[in-house]
Image (cartoon, grey):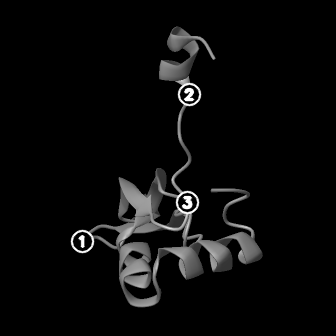
């Protein structure tokens, strides 16, 4: 892919482990007037070392996804994310 095109692409705001996406809600003012707003997940671009394949992988992952990887392990979290359809390959 060309470098100039790569800069213009926008990454989606979806966690690759938990599948969390932005939610839609209301800003409520003091006068109780409501306007639409979005609640974004707490996402990070993070590299993880996949020991079984002896390589690094990059994931766009939420804070909750980091805790899941700490608890279950990277390999198992990736397998569950693939099974649930959050990632196609890693």
From the top left corner, tell me how far across and down residue 69 is, in percent. 43, 78
Q: Going by the picture, which residue comes out furthest to the bottom? A: 71
Q: Which sits earlier in the primary sequence, circle 2 or circle 1?
A: 2
Residue beneath disc 1: 30
Residue beneath disc 3: 53
From the top left corner, tell me how far across and down residue 64 is, in percent. 40, 78
* In the image: residue 60, left or right of residue 18: left
Q: Quadrant of residue 90?
A: bottom right
Residues under labels 2 and 1: Cα distance? 38 Å
User: Of the residues tagged 3 and 2, which is closer to the observer?
Assistant: 3
- The vertical placement of 18 against 37, above or below, is below
Assign a secondary structure to mark 3. loop
Q: Going by the picture, which residue comes out furthest to the left? A: 30
Task: Report how many numbered discs are placed on residues in the image.
Answer: 3
| Residue appearing at x 56%, y 63% in the figure | 16
Label 1 neighbour load within 10 Å: few <14, some 14-19, many 20+: few
Does residue 25 appear in this view?
yes
Which disc number belongs to residue 81?
none
Residue beneath disc 2: 9
Does residue 35 appear in this view?
no
């Amino acid at each position: 892919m060309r470098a100039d095109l790569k800069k213009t692409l926008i990454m989606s705001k979806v966690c690759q482990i938990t599948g969390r996406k932005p939610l839609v809600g209301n800003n409520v003012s003091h006068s109780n007037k409501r306007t639409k707003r979005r609640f974004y997940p707490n996402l990070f671009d993070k590299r993880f070392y996949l020991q079984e394949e002896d390589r690094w992988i990059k994931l766009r992952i939420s804070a909750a996804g980091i805790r899941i990887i700490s608890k279950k392990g990277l390999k198992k979290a990736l397998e569950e994310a693939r099974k649930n359809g959050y990632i196609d390959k890693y």
